[in-house]
Image (cartoon, rainbow, N blue to C red):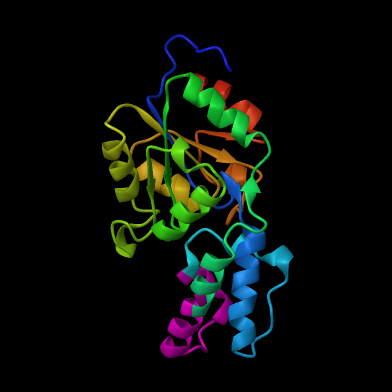
Amino acid sequence: MATPMPNFPFDIVGFDLDGTLLDTSGDIGAALNHALTTAGRPAVPQADVPRLIGGGSGQLLRTVLGEGASEAEFVRLQDVLLEFYADNIARHTRLFPGGEAMLDALAAQGVTLAVATNKIEANAVRLFNELGLLDRFACVIGGDTLGLARAKPKPDMLHEMVARCGGGRAAFVGDTSYDVGAAKAAGMPVVAVTFGYHDHPPHELGADATIDHYDELIAVLASL
């Protein structure tokens, strides 16, 4: 177990899920392509899936379908996607390298851990539960927890995260402009991971710091 640092600056550290804590692209890609196949649409190459993740399943599907899709088709395919994903949610998904040791190290500092993700809350909870990680987090807030209109990059989810964790100084860790935007709007320091599913180059997201591996996170947070 990591040795606690004196005066560690944060009481709460929150994380995005997809592309930050967990490499979920394999399972999301499988669900997306299953839905597309049912509509006779071409599959998306797996290598292209990570750049589409970040805004939740609805935005992912709308981006792939384009403007030609009707609302009825979108709703039907989103239902197919979500059903398949829920049934196959943890076949390929894993923590990013160093993630488990990093969570242990933060817990050793007395930090309260939380998740704020644009993934639907039920799916986020189910995924963490299937991976045996759910008990590590004081709360898991999804994109639909407060209503989709209040999802990241709005700050509401992060304010709710702090409230549910009992208050205190918080930092956030993410991989996209949604995460950085939400943290900045919430007045919260934010660290971007370079190994995630970026919608912009990670060093151009405007985060307070970037890390290439979770081995770096404790020291970087301590310096903010």
Q: Based on the displayed image, in which of its 4 quarters is residue 45 positioned?
A: bottom right
> Against 66, is 212 above or below?
above
Q: Residue at x 50, y 13 (%)?
A: 4
> Against 20, is 67 above or below?
below
Verify whether residue 122 appears in magenta.
no
Q: Based on the displayed image, in which of its 4 quarters is residue 168 positioned?
A: top left
Q: Nearer the viewer, residue 23 or 47?
A: 23
Q: Residue at x 61, y 56 (%)?
A: 24
- Quarter holding the N terminus is top right
Verify whether residue 72 appears in magenta.
yes
Q: Based on the displayed image, in which of its 4 quarters is residue 192 positioned?
A: top right
> Against 175, is 108 above or below?
above
Percent position of residue 108, x then y: 50, 20
Q: Residue farthest to the top?
A: 6
Percent position of residue 131, x then y: 57, 47
Q: Residue at x 49, y 71 (%)?
A: 82
Residue 17 in sight in this render: no
Residue 90 in sight in this render: yes
Q: Give, as a single range, the part of the protein colored magenta.
A: 58-79
Q: Residue at x 55, y 47 (%)?
A: 175
Classified by dominant secondary structure, the portion drawn in magenta counts as helix
Q: Nearer the viewer, residue 3 or 194?
A: 3
Total number of numbered labels? 0
Percent position of residue 111, x then y: 42, 25
Percent position of residue 106, x then y: 50, 25
Q: Nearer the viewer, residue 5 or 212?
A: 5
